[in-house]
Image (cartoon, helix red, strand yellow):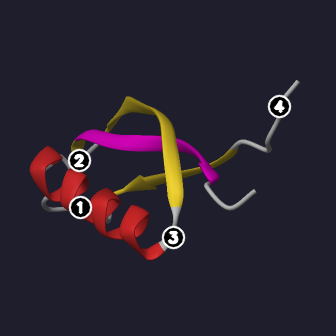
């Protein structure tokens, strides 16, 4: 049976003006994934926190190294 370690990170825009900008968040996450090198993304989960400054979305990325 094949197995691997699943890793994860969460990312959001900086708090304050623009924290609710989903396209900007997607670009930030895409840049972070590219920076990881050779990985296979297993899942993306979006969360939204309600703050005094409005909605604050974040993405959690689940992935594993393709070389493992």
Return the residue found at the far top: 1
Disc 2 is placed on an element classified as loop
Residue identifier under label 2: 53
Residue identifier under label 3: 36
- Is-magenta flag for residue 51? no
Residue beneath the point at 72% across and 42% down? 6
- Is residue 13 at all visible to an observer of this figure? no
- Name the foreground residue: 23 vs 57: 23
Q: CA distance from mark 2 to mark 4?
A: 46 Å
- Observer-side mark, 1 or 3, equals 3
Residue identifier under label 1: 16
Residue identifier under label 4: 2
Disc 3 is placed on an element classified as loop
Q: Are marks 4 and 1 in contact (CB under 8 Å)?
A: no
Q: Residues within 10 Å of mark 4 (few under 14, many from 20)?
A: few
Residue beneath the point at 40% across and 42% down? 59
In this rendering, position of residue 50 left or right of residue 17: right
Q: Residues within 10 Å of mark 1 (few under 14, many from 20)?
A: few
Which of pointers 1 and 3 lies earlier in the amino acid sequence?
Answer: 1
Residue beneath the point at 23% across and 54% down? 25
| Quadrant of residue 3 within the rendered picture | top right
Q: Are marks 2 and 1 in contact (CB under 8 Å)?
A: yes
Residue beneath the point at 75% across and 56% down? 68
- Name the foreground residue: 39 vs 45: 39
Q: Which region is colored magenta?
A: 55-65
- Name the foreground residue: 52 vs 26: 26
């Amino acid at each position: 049976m094949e197995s691997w370690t699943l890793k994860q990170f969460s990312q959001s825009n900086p708090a304050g003006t623009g924290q609710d900008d989903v396209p900007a968040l997607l670009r930030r996450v895409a840049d972070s994934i590219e920076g990881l090198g050779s990985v296979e993304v297993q899942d993306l989960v979006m969360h939204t926190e309600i703050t005094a400054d409005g909605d604050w979305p974040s993405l959690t990325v689940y992935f594993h190294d393709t070389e493992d």
